[in-house]
Each structure stands twice: as C-alpha cells, then as structure tokens.
Amino acid sequence: MDQRIDIDWTACQGHGLCADFLPDHIVLDEWGYPLVDGAPVPARTVKRARRAAADCPVLALRLIPARAA
Amino acid sequence: MTATFPDLHLSPRLLAPGTAPADLAAHRRRHGPLEYGDPESVLRAVAASGLTGRGGAAFPTHRKLVAVAEAGRRTGRAPVVVANGAEGEPASHKDRTLLHRSPHLVLDGLRAAAHAVGAGKAYIAVGDGASGLESALAQRTGDPLPVEVVRLPASFLAGQSSALARYVSGGAALPADQLPPVRERGVHRAPTLVQNVETLAHLALVARHGADWYRTAGTPAQPGSALCTLHAAGHEPRVVEAPYGLPLARLLPLEGASAVLVGGYHGTWIPACEAARLTLDATLLGAGVLAALPAGRCGVAETARVLRHLALQSAGQCGPCLNGLPRIATAFRTLAAPGPQGTARTDLTRWSGLVEGRGACHHPDGTVRLVRSALTTFAAEIDSHAHGHCTATDRTPLLPVPEDRN
C-alpha cells in the first residue's frame, strides 16, 4: 500500500534532519519546520523515508497509509 | 441575553421558555419522558434525521456515533461519552444558555448517545459558568449511567476534542496529535464520543419524536435548527434558535452594516451586501456566532484585536502555529493602524500558507480563514490605512475579547 510522510506537529521541534534525508520531499520553512509534499512516497525512497523516521530525534516523522487523515 | 423571535416561524425546540432553568418536572411536562428503543433504532433515527454536530464542524452525528460504537466492539472496551460544553469562543453564549435553561434536555441527549454507542462512562465538561448542573443531575435518580461533571479551564482550545479527552483523563487541556483519533482512543484510552451539548439536546428530541419531526424545520439538505449568538452594535448579545435556510437578514439587522462575521473567530467576514443574500448555512455557521459590523466601525481593527487573542490562545505546541500566529497578529496590527504597512500584506499571505494544515488541531486553519476573509472584505479600508487615514468614526469595540494576561 502507498505510504506518505506524516508529521506529529506536537512533537516536531524543527531539528531538520528529515530534510537532509529526503530533500526531494521535504524542505524547511522559514522557521525550520518541515514542509512535506503530501504525495505517496515512491518505492525507491521508502527505505530512506523509514531511516528519516527512525533518526528523527523526537520521533515526530512517520509513514502512514496514503489515504489516512 | 436571550430572545425568541415570533417571526421566525419556529417555536424554540431547545431553549425552555423564560429565563429560569427548567427543573426535571417542568422538562418532563414540556417534552414527555425520554423513551427510545434499542441502540440500533436510535442510530437509525439519528441517521434519518440528518443531524450534524453543532460544535463548529457540522460533522454528521450518525457517522460519529457509528465509528465510536464500532471502535468499542473492535477493541472490546466500552466507549466513553463526553458532552462538550466548553464553549471557549468568547463570542459564543449558546451552549451556556442552553445548559442554564434546559440542562435536562442535554442530559437526556447524553443518556441517549451513551445508549447508542454502548458507553460505560459519561462526562459533561463545562466552563465555570454552568452552576446548576450538579443539582440537575441530583434530580435524575433513575438514570442508568452516572454522569460526572468536569470543570474546564477557561481557554479557547479546551473544548477541542483531543484536549478535552486529555483533560478528562487527568492530563492538561491541550490538543493532541490527530493519530490515533479520539473516537478510537480518547479518555483513559477508551474509544470516546465527544459531542457538543447542543447536538446532544437535538439528539434527545430526535430520539423522542423521530427524524420526520426533526426535518420539519430547516431545508432538505440541512434539516433542523441551530442556536445562534447574535452580536449587533448597541445590543447585548442574544441567543436565538433559527432553522437552517433562514435568510441572515431576518436574524441580524443588516441595514447600516458594512460586513458580517459568520462563524465566529474561526469564521469568515462577508460584506454586508453579500450577507444579505445568504441564508443560515451549517457549513459557514461554525458554532453559531453571527456579528454585524456597523459602517463607521473599523473591521481591520476588530480583526486585529481578535487575532491577538487567537495568537495568545495558541497552545504553543506546534511549531508553525507557535511561530506563525504571533507574527500574523502583529502584521495585522500594523494594517489596523493608519500609516506605512511595509511588507505586512505579503507577509500575512505567506504566513497564512505556512500555518494552514500544519498543526495537531484546527486552530491555525480557523485563524487563517479569518485572516484571508478580512484581507478581502476590508481591502478598501486597508488601502485607506496605507494612505494614512481610517474611515471609522466610532472606535467602540464590537467583538468581545477577554483580557489576556500573558
């Protein structure tokens, strides 16, 4: 099933590591918080996206089914 | 503070006549005993009625009830039901008016909703004002499910459903991340139905009189009626019950108004000439606040005051809201003062895009809705301010904003 990147905004502190891992999908806004394209993560990127989720210092990034709210 | 309008062709359904609370005996005389069938028949009646939530989102009540009941079956945990009377919006008085005048109708609805979802526990969460609830509950000795009253801190966001679920569970009244949703895991991790007190009052009447009766008010697409808080200059705010589809001009005096705020502080400014063609619409109405801004008052200054309050009421948990809302409020204050505006307008547009959809709750989204509608509706006035003068002749504030101390 397609997955997309979801941010827990109550947890995110704008460390910005996710934008280093996934520069094609995440850029940082002017305050350092991730701007995520809502598109499904392509198969070739899923592994890196999982790494980004695991390496987020506050575990604010996760992959969820593309259709979930 | 309340009034009924004889020309609305709707005798009030929810608000008991007079200003004193209806005790249990008066309530039973007016509405008859609360009788309903099995949970399935309550759910069927609610589905057929087309009842939607009156807390602001107008979500179909039937779908929420079914989702909570299903989550209860799936997890093997009895759901919890919370009647939401928080009413954190300073301009709204309808929930506290309803709780004051017709507490037993709300408690009937809470009981019917708990029955429909198979709940094992029920709460009613209210602000400081609702003082008669405990005595109303004490009169109801025959209720199958005990109801606990929870007193909420006064804040704009305390009534947000995840904040409410957290507070009732013993935590802080702060919104939580939307996954998992409260309907799946809410109060003490049980599936939780959070329903506005007005919705429950309507539900109590649907359970009694059925869907066809409910649909005798309103329109086929938006059946029923809603409680509205009306703000007009020179008058105390009034709470009225009006059917969906009623022309706004029948509710609010639009002669001499320049704009109307529809849906409260997370709502939309609409020019008075357009508002005159609108009817009461659940998708615009939010929690029922309508305010007519007289020509001669400054809508930019009104919006700036409200935005300052909204920024201060941010829970400060989510980065975009924490950073964006104070900047938005400050930029709008720049627009509210006649004089140079610098980059305020383009900043507002950019920051609005940056906070929208990027929070655990909809506080940033609602705030942005207000900002964008104000930038459009008051564009000419903002231009005047840029040229150094405000066209307003009366600086008396229209919209209530509490004194923020932080």
Image (cartoon, coloured by chain):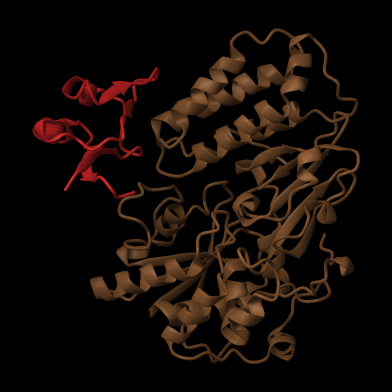
Q: Position of residue B113 (x, y in %)?
A: 48, 77
Chain B appears in which tint? brown
Identify the residue shown where x is 66% and y is 55%.
Answer: B281
Identified at 19% across, 31% down, the residue is A56
In front: B265, or B236?
Answer: B265
Q: Is residue B91 above or below residue A20?
A: below
Q: Position of residue B204 (x, y in %)?
A: 59, 79
Position of residue B65 in the picture relative to residue B293 (left or right): left
Q: Is B333 situated left or right of B74 in this image?
A: right
- The image quarter containing residue A5 is top left
**Residue B62 seen anywhere in this rendered image of the structure:** yes
* Image x and y of residue B250, in percent: 84, 56
Q: Say which colour chain A has.
A: red
Vertically, is B356 above or below B113? above
**Which image quarter holds the C terminus of chain B?**
top right
Residue depicted at 49% across the width and 52% down the height: B160
